[in-house]
Amino acid sequence: MWCVYFLACMLRPICVPVPETAVILWGSRQIGSLGAFFFGVIGSVLGLMIMYSLSSLIAHRISKGRKEKRQLAWLKQLTGRYRVWILGVLLIVPLVSDEVLCAGSAFLKIPLPQFLKIGIIAKVISIGMIAFQVFLATCAV
């Protein structure tokens, strides 16, 4: 069962339109909170890395035009020096899908190592909150 859960967590940022909360809660019920946390973080970060790599290949081809360069410059100016913090918060709080955040990070040319650091921290927080809430709820009863 952990293989299916790991695969779901890895494919979720790439192509599975299911909320992170639903996948993590399902995994917590199937393999326990600690397993859901461990495999969820590793699978999600691996999925983020794959999606970022795919997005950066596409972004390189798209951003060759003048109009696109102007729009990217405007977006970089809009987000300013806080774009890393904005990315971290949006990876924790599910306002925007991870696919969009990966693509946006590739377009903004956030380096992959920096993106992965942010992704790891954000996924540890978000998946940890979801996976261990099931454990805490069953202990409280």
Image (spheres, rainbow, N blue to C red):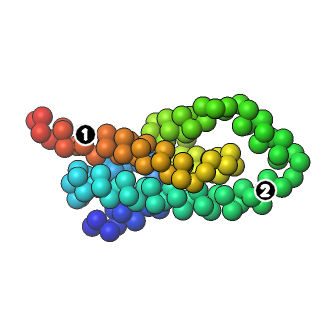
Circle 1 or circle 2, nearest the eye: 2
- Provide the secondary structure element on which disc 1 rests: helix
Q: Position of residue 61 (x, y in %)?
A: 78, 60
x, y percentage for residue 140? 12, 34
Residue count near mark 1 (Cα–Cα under 10 Å), binned few <14, some 14–19, many ≥20: some
The furthest residue to the right:
66
- Would residue 37 appear left or right of 137 to someone viewing this image? right
Q: Are marks 1 and 2 in contact (CB under 8 Å)?
A: no
Distance Cα–Cα, label 1 vs label 2: 42 Å
Front residue (pair 42, 20): 42
- Note whether 123 is above or below 53 in the view shown: above
Counting from the top left corner in percent of width and height, residue 127 is at: 35, 46
Which residue matches tag 2? 62
Q: Position of residue 129 (x, y in %)?
A: 31, 39
Residue at 71%, 60% (x, y): give it. Answer: 58
**Horizontal arrangement in the rendering, residue 70 relative to residue 42 (left or right):** right
* Residue 77's disc number: none
Secondary element under disc 2, as helix, strand or loop, is: helix
Compared with 42, 25 (above or below) is above
Q: Amino acid at mark 1?
A: Gln
Looking at the image, residue 128 sits to the left or right of residue 54; the answer is left
Residue toward you, 51 or 76 = 76
Give the total number of marks visible in the rendering: 2
Q: Is residue 8 visible?
A: no
Q: Is residue 115 left or right of residue 42?
A: right
Q: Quadrant of the C terminus?
A: top left
The N terminus: image quadrant: bottom left
Q: Residue at x 52, y 58 (%)?
A: 49
Question: Mark number for residue 133?
Answer: 1
Q: Nearer the viewer, residue 67 or 17?
A: 67
